[in-house]
Image (cartoon, helix red, strand yellow):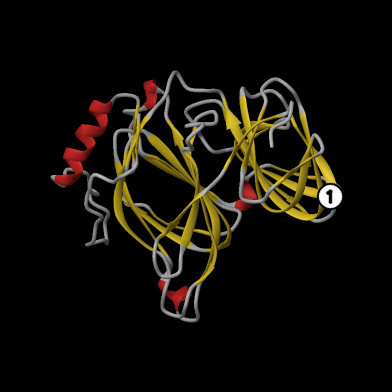
Amino acid sequence: MTTPLIQDVLHPHVRDLGEGFSVRRLLPAASRQMIGPFIFLDHMGPTVFAPGAGIDVRPHPHIGLATATYLFEGVILHRDSLGTIQEIHPGDVNWMTAGRGIAHSERTPPALRIDGARLHGLQFWVALPKISEQTEPSFQHHPKASLPRVDGQAYTLTLIAGTGWGMTSPVQTHSALFYADVHFHQSGCFPIPAEHGERAIYVVDGDARVDGVNLSPGLVHVLQAGSPVVVEVEGEARLVVFGGEPLEGPRRIWWNFVASDSALIDQAKQDWSEQRFDPVPGETEYLPLPGPRAVKTD
């Protein structure tokens, strides 16, 4: 339901990745490709794996974007072609800028598979502005304690990336944006300022309202631009708010590649198929290019 403050509501598509693990994909959507520079959103889990199982995302490539991984529960071991080896724990942020090209893998650490691992979190892709699409790849890890936060009477707000609520995250980004985790431990409300051009709310769980309208968990609620918004919450809840300034134009998406020019995607496809991306040290597997049913957005 839309209101004067809610412009659009985005529904997920479920993707089964095997081993009882599924994701709910909310961006890109049929009605909207991006919210600010955010072009992709997967909600992972919550999932409990059988003993011995876990996620095993083999090495795969990216261009033209930054991946932002944030967990509520569980651990993921990240490896990339820069030589990075980094576990991410709940409340930390892994921010990998692909730029001209990077490859990485994501797996459940071996020690956590013994008794059955748990996993719950979000992964965003942030499209890069044209000036940064061919930048050198990089990786940032910021532990939970390094992220700015506001401890309100009813909630804790953690600024994962960008600027907002008078704070600046240490995560280095290539465009103006904001991304925050808001965890309510009792009923209350919090403000979303109007400083960013595009804004959205994703309710992970709990009972939240804007402008008297319930915000259903698992849906992205896109807010009207230019007006401050107050979110009201009943009881315990968790939601994320995100957005920023729009980029210079739409982006093309094919598989794991994002670009303003289809020629960059064509080159990345050729480079990956001919194994010209730098390899991920310690990995022998890789994901081949998909068939013609891969995601493509013009």
* Vertical relation: 271 (above or below) 46: above
The residue positioned farthest toward the left in the image shown = 274
Number of numbered labels in the structure image = 1
Q: Is residue 241 left or right of residue 184?
A: left
The image quarter containing residue 96 is: top left
Which residue is nearer to you in this view: 37 or 172?
A: 37
* Amino acid beneath label 1: Ala
Residue shown at 29% from the left, 38% from the top: 101
Residue reaching furthest front? 1
Q: Mark 1 points at which residue?
A: 154
State the residue in front, 91 or 39.
Answer: 39
Classify residue 232 by image quadrant.
top right
Up-down relation of residue 24 to residue 194 (above or below): below
Q: Is 78 situated left or right of 209 in this image?
A: left
Q: Position of residue 85 (x, y in %)?
A: 38, 57
Residue found at x 61% / y 54%:
91
- Residue 163: name its quadrant: top right
